[in-house]
Image: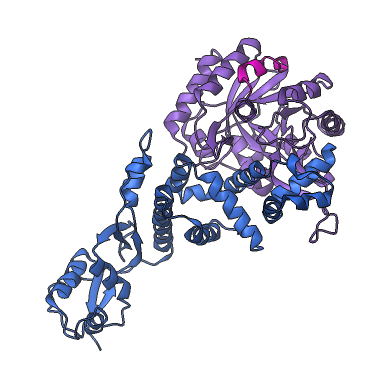
Chain colours: A blue, B purple
């Protein structure tokens, strides 16, 4: 086969991963172009697409330095980006223009593609959401006007009519690993990803109203769901009922609310 | 970070025979150069980057630029537009680059007639691809190079590609392909040692033995970057440091040749560790006796 023809076929496959995918599934389709399918290394071509697409995501390394480090150490980059390229191409989507949109697209793909039975896939899912949360809150900090910090009202005697309100911006994430441990591991010279323990973790990424720094608060389940449900409209009584109690909140629930208020992430309004 | 007076540009002295050390452009690299004045001699910058972000030209007030290119598709059958070639010429003139580095690869190809492409639109890629390694491809390279060289006032030098997979119809090895091209034209070689090592790893050959078969006397510039083995294949990786094997290959080359420029391509991540970057620059200085 002459160079011109061979390179035309290879280029088409690399530029259009959906076409390459169809050839991988049904190599005989290549005979339509007058070539023997056995002479094309379709699998390595597919991996090469992964390299091409990975390179096109280099700008995301600004937001996702540890995620990329994890993918390198865990030998995931080629597999992830080749699969991503194929997925997007089959859906008829081209790569988004901005880093923010590319990050959203990648997250949306990974959520369905990752195999959470695989340790390194679980770590990847947690770490990318960790860095995305930090990115999102940092961007919010740059855009938002500074607000006065809410005065802590933990001294107030809470009643069912008080309305818990979140002070600042939060991102709430449940994870199977602690990304802070994963990051520390990845900073080692020879990181051992298998040593990052798995479990159930509830995190609140929180930027207070009056500050630029982002705090990561580890919560128990009740604290996590209390913040999740604190819409600024529901009263303590409403929340208590949502947790399966009566309108009069249990002491343990009030303790959780006071603790969150003591940290500063929650304050209480009274009904007008 | 950089000013904007384009009259005050710096340039590499093209007559100097001293080996210069430079970095490839990437996020974070201009800042490193600013905070480490005099540590490197030049910044290698892709034509495509300058085209996309013309404001980067002002970097040249602080450090000479070396122009690199990925648009000529030297080993391809679809030439770039006249407009692109003219822009490359203008950029070469503006940057006062002593040469233009281009890949011995293709980045565009003939259209493949499919149900959704009936117009015959050529396929454009975003990354250069190692061509078919054959006499047919050698002829094409020579034809393209002959046309391209006449357009530019500075020499064109060609960079060896990494081979990840073989293009059907290939009849020769990478070193034979390079040797065939360079034996029939008087071009300079941009020897990417990482690409070279990757090709050896992926094709199961001995890099040191293969190196001896290259026209090393033609080496003008050398590229160095990291290697990452994933999914059973060795890949180019500009976000990690070059392995010691690449430096060993460099020592072998320096025993036989004296390139004019050594470029560290650590430009994919803005967080490339500065300590390693400084260490590798010192290592290069040591190897060329510039300590």
Locate residue B161 relative to residue A108 in the image: left or right.
Answer: right
Q: Report the label total.
A: 0
x then y, percent, for residue B134: 81, 30
Above or below for B233 versus A223: above
Residue at horizontal 84 percent and vertical 47 percent from the top: A34
x then y, percent, for residue A46: 64, 46
Residue B281 part of the magenta-drawn span: no
x then y, percent, for residue B192: 64, 27
Above or below for B82 versus A126: above
Residue B212 part of the magenta-drawn span: yes
Residue at horizontal 61 percent and vertical 48 percent from the top: A53
Report the magenta residues as a range: B205-217
Whether residue B225 is visible, yes or no, is yes
User: In the figure, residue A185 lies in which quadrant?
Assistant: top left
Locate residue A66 relative to residue B175 in the image: left or right.
Answer: left
Locate residue A33 relative to residue A46 in the image: left or right.
Answer: right
Q: Residue furthest bottom?
A: A272
| Most foreground residue, B203 or B110 | B203
Whether residue B111 is visible, yes or no, is no
Q: Residue furthest top?
A: B255
Residue at horizontal 85 percent and vertical 54 percent from the top: B120
Above or below for B233 versus A19: above
| Most foreground residue, A24 or A205 | A24
On-image quarter of the C terminus of chain A: bottom left
x then y, percent, for residue A56: 60, 48
On-image quarter of the N terminus of chain A: top right
Residue at horizontal 72 percent and vertical 22 percent from the top: B175
Above or below for B16 versus B36: above
């Amino acid at each position: 086969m002459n160079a011109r023809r061979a390179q035309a076929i290879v280029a088409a496959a690399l530029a259009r991963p959906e076409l390459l995918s169809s050839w991988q599934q049904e190599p005989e389709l290549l005979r339509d172009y007058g070539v023997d399918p056995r002479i094309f290394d379709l699998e390595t071509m597919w991996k090469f697409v992964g390299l091409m697409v990975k390179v096109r995501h280099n700008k995301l390394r600004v937001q996702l330095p540890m995620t990329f480090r994890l993918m390198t150490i865990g030998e995931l980059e080629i597999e992830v980006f080749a699969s991503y390229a194929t997925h997007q191409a089959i859906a008829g989507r081209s790569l988004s223009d901005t880093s923010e949109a590319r990050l959203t697209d990648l997250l949306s793909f990974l959520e369905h593609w990752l195999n959470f039975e695989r340790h390194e896939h679980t770590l990847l899912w947690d770490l990318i959401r960790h860095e995305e949360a930090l990115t999102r809150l940092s961007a919010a900090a740059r855009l938002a006007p500074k607000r006065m910090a809410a005065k802590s009202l933990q001294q107030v005697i809470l009643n069912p009519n008080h309305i818990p309100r979140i002070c600042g911006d939060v991102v709430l994430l449940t994870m199977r690993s602690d990304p802070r441990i994963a990051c520390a591991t990845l900073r080692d010279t020879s990181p051992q990803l298998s040593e990052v323990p798995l479990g159930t973790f509830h995190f609140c990424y929180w930027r207070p109203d009056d500050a630029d720094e982002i705090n990561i608060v580890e919560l128990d389940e009740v604290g996590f769901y209390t913040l999740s449900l604190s819409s600024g409209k529901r009263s303590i009584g409403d929340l208590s009922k949502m947790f399966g109690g009566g309108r009069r909140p249990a002491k343990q629930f009030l303790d959780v609310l006071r603790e969150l208020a003591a940290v500063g992430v929650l304050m209480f309004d009274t009904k007008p | 970070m950089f000013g904007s007076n384009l009259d005050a540009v710096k340039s590499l002295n093209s007559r100097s025979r001293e080996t210069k050390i430079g970095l490839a452009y990437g996020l974070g690299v201009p800042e490193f150069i600013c905070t480490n004045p005099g540590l490197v001699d030049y910044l290698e910058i892709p034509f495509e980057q300058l085209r996309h972000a013309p404001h980067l030209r002002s970097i040249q007030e602080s450090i000479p630029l070396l122009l690199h290119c990925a648009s000529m598709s030297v080993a391809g059958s679809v030439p770039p537009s006249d407009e692109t070639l003219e822009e490359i010429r203008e950029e070469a003139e503006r940057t006062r680059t002593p040469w233009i580095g281009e890949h011995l690869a293709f980045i565009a190809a003939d259209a493949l007639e499919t149900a959704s492409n009936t117009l015959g639109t050529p396929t454009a890629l975003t990354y250069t691809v190692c061509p078919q390694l054959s006499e047919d491809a050698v002829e094409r390279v020579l034809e393209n190079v002959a046309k391209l060289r006449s357009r530019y006032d500075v020499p064109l030098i060609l960079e060896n590609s990494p081979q990840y997979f073989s293009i059907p119809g290939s009849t020769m090895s990478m070193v034979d392909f390079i040797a065939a091209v360079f034996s029939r034209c008087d071009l300079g070689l941009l020897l990417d040692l990482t690409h070279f090592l990757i090709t050896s790893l992926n094709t199961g050959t001995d890099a040191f033995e293969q190196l001896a078969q290259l026209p090393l006397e033609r080496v003008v510039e050398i590229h160095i970057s990291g290697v990452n083995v994933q999914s059973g294949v060795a890949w180019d990786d500009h976000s990690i440091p070059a392995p010691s094997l690449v430096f060993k290959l460099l020592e072998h080359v320096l025993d036989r040749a004296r390139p004019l420029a050594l470029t560290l391509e650590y430009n994919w991540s803005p967080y490339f560790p500065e300590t390693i970057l400084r260490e590798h620059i010192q290592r290069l200085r040591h190897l060329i006796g510039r300590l």
